[in-house]
Amino acid sequence: MREIKFLDLKKQYLSIKNEIDNAIQDVLLSSAFAGGPFVKSFEENFAKIHGAKYCSGVNNGTSALHIAMMALGIGEEDEIIMPANTFIATPASVSLQGAKPVFVDCSEDDFNIDAELIDRAITEKTRAILPVHLYGQPAKMDRILEIAQKNDLLVIEDCAQAHLAEFEGKKVGTMGIAGCFSFYPGKNLGAYGEGGAVISNDEEFWKKIQAIKEHGSFKKYHHEYLGHNYRLEGIQGAILDVKLKYIEAWTETRRKNADLYRKYLSGVNDIILPSERKNVRHVYHLFVIRTSKRDELSSFLNGEGIQTNIHYPIPCHLQRSYGFMGYKKGDFPVSEKLSREILSLPMSEQLTEEDIVCISEKISNFFQ
Ligand SMILES: *Cc1c(COP(=O)(O)O)cnc(C)c1O
């Protein structure tokens, strides 16, 4: 039986093996393991590819979000508005500061925060809006920025799934005070371990992050702020710098693969294909379809050797860890409905047209 992995990281590695092996060797021979020149080079290149002034590499995407909250002084009195349908790291970064994540339902058209519901979630305590560009499609940033400006709120973008995505020609991560990225191995740009970054155009904010990730120090053993050890490893910096050269081409291949899925799945009436809005560049971290027979389809595909996933089976407000906030079933009907219907199909730049034809035929067979 033909097996199709959700993501084939080994195949990706083999396609750039020499460059990666050499980059790792360079780090080993220079002993620049924690922070250092390889991280600095990657930070400069990652800022440049976004047209942003500054970048700070950190140890993962959760830390990227959390350190942004720390540097902005988000604390117990504050509320941050975000979508209910996201990975748990988004609200965790706020809760870890003692602040309150305020969830908002998402729109059915793009799975992102419903911008029209943000206004009614704003209170005296609201400090920021934290949109997530889920699955690789930018949230409706025009409305979000307008609401933020009118209410004097900060905007922090969760770009963990949206490397090089664009909204009206602008790269995600550059529209608010901070863009927070994850380089978890399975992300569009992935480390061989953990990694993350914050990009910004604000020099003071960036400097504070650079300090906080080293226990609040600009100078060794002189601590200006309470901080953390959130440094990016040298090996990861060197690996990410190699992969950064390929990310544009890989992104285009993902977009082509999404077009191929649309072509080969167009005849299947029982599923809803993901929408792509006109004014965005969707980077397809995930290709998420919807069907009322989700669980049956996913076990069928599994039996046929095709790996699928669900992002995410339980919205944040219904997670046990957030039970203390008192949210209940029915609070965010769209997010809850989506969590029962969504299915992520294999997606990466390593996926071939043959793979997509095979997956599409199986899906079509299932519904016949
Ligand atoms: C992956 C992810 C994160 C967290 O990144 P890690 O590197 O896993 O800590 C945050 N937000 C979203 C939306 C993610 O997908």
Image: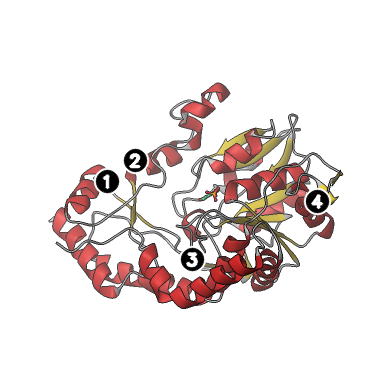
Q: Is residue 363 above or below residue 22?
A: above
The residue under label 3 is: 283
Q: Disc 3 vs disc 4: which is toward the camera?
A: 4
Label 1 sits on what residue type? Arg
Sequence-wise, which precedes: disc 1 or disc 4?
Answer: 4
Q: Position of residue 221 (x, y in %)?
A: 84, 46
Q: Describe the element under mark 4 as helix, strand or loop.
A: helix
Q: Disc 1 vs disc 4: which is toward the camera?
A: 4
Sequence-wise, which precedes: disc 3 or disc 2?
Answer: 3
Q: Residues within 10 Å of mark 2 (few under 14, many from 20)?
A: some
Q: Describe the element under mark 3 as helix, strand or loop.
A: loop
Label 2 sits on what residue type? Arg
**What is the CA distance from the residue labelled 3 to the residue labelled 2?**
24 Å
Sequence-wise, which precedes: disc 3 or disc 4?
Answer: 4
Residue 34 in sight here: yes
**What is the CA distance from the residue labelled 1 to the residue labelled 2?**
7 Å
The residue under label 1 is: 294
Q: Nearer the viewer, residue 242 or 234?
A: 234
Give yes or no for contact between labels 1 and 2 (Cβ–Cβ under 8 Å): yes
